[in-house]
Amino acid sequence: MPRKNSASCRENGLERALGWWPDRSRPRGGDSPELSILETDVQLQLDAFEVTLRDIAVVGIDQLHALSVAVGWPHRESDWRMLLDLGRGIAAVDEIGRVVGSVMWFRYAPDFVKVGMLITSPRLQEQGAGRWLMQRVHELNKGSVFGLTATRAARRLYRSLGYGHEQKVLQCQGRAVVPADVRAVVAGSLRPVRPADHDALLDLDRAAVGCDRSAMFRRLLPLSTGHVLVRNGETVAFALCRQFGRGHVIGPVIAATEEDAIAVAMPHVEAHAGGFLRADTPAANAAFTGFLAAAGMQVHDTVTSMGLGRAPFRPASADGPRRMALASHTLG
């Protein structure tokens, strides 16, 4: 097979160059179009390195896990498996079969795509592999608005690609403790999530982010415990918690006020006291961030929510439900 370089892929269009065809044996991603597989691998020369593009669906999870471990990301193989069930992606494979790069995307609306899991091995980071992978995502999703959560190391790359609409997000984590002096006094009743609550959770999330993440919730809910706050017969806030990385992550948390967010998150802190717990919250949520710190989850890192075309997540109203904690950096 003749070798194709990055220039030829841009000229011919990635869809034609890669030969994407429906894989009807693996329905994934909710109501989004069926995933495709690579019928033809494409080889690319990056300086002294030769890599081959493949559909991420045909790459072993153990290889993807090895890639994320190599750059210090906490994802377990089961975390990768959930993402692969929800989205599409591309993997770059080197001459001896090692995965040296990845990127995924998740279609939340006909015109909106969430991008995540952009990883390149250290030896390719200075060869432009990250930019090249992002350009491929843009080509495969022409006409879409894009959103992502940028690490500090990748923020300059995304800005150079035109991303803006920035929102600072705090990665809070640590050994959980039950804060003795933090109690949210809120009207309403707090209880565990029931199957009958699922439609209400979707409605709250849709109002908070401005798009339909029902496929994500279908995958998250069986893996999660959850609590809802009910006021005057209406579900006004919820928080989910699941295993992730080094322990558990609280998220998503959707509420209209930080007091409501603290109320629904507190049971998860109590349930996991003494264990590793994490939550990712927009920095504007000062009271909720203070609660997380009192619960043993100090600010470990900062990332940036960014959009290309517009802000990636847009609440339906300024005083309505909003994201108090992300489902994850990748899922938003």
Image (cartoon, rainbow, N blue to C red):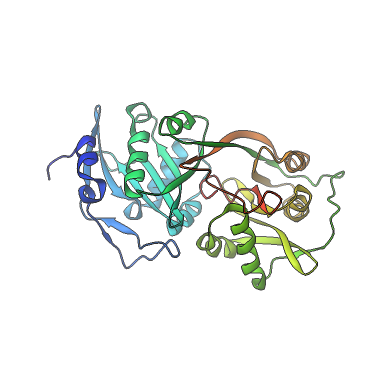
Which residue reaches farthest left?
2
Which image quadrant is residue 254 in? Answer: bottom right
Residue 75, placed above or below residue 167: below
270 displayed left or right of 88: right
282 displayed left or right of 63: right
Residue at 65% from the left image edge and 45% from the top image edge: 279
Given residues 115 and 66, the one toward you in this image is 115
278 displayed left or right of 269: left
Quarter of the figure with the N terminus: top left
Rendering coords of residue 305 (x, y %): 55, 40
Rendering coords of residue 137 (x, y %): 36, 45
Which residue reaches farthest front?
317
Rendering coords of residue 6 (x, y %): 24, 36
Residue 268, placed above or below residue 148: below
Residue at 62% from the left image edge and 63% from the top image edge: 203
Given residues 81 and 290, the one toward you in this image is 290
Rendering coords of residue 121 (x, y %): 38, 34
Badge count: 0
Residue 314, placed above or below residue 228: above
73 displayed left or right of 6: right
Residue at 44% from the left image edge and 59% from the top image edge: 85
Given residues 94 and 310, the one toward you in this image is 310
Residue at 51% from the left image edge and 47% from the top image edge: 330
Which image quadrant is residue 285 in? Answer: top right
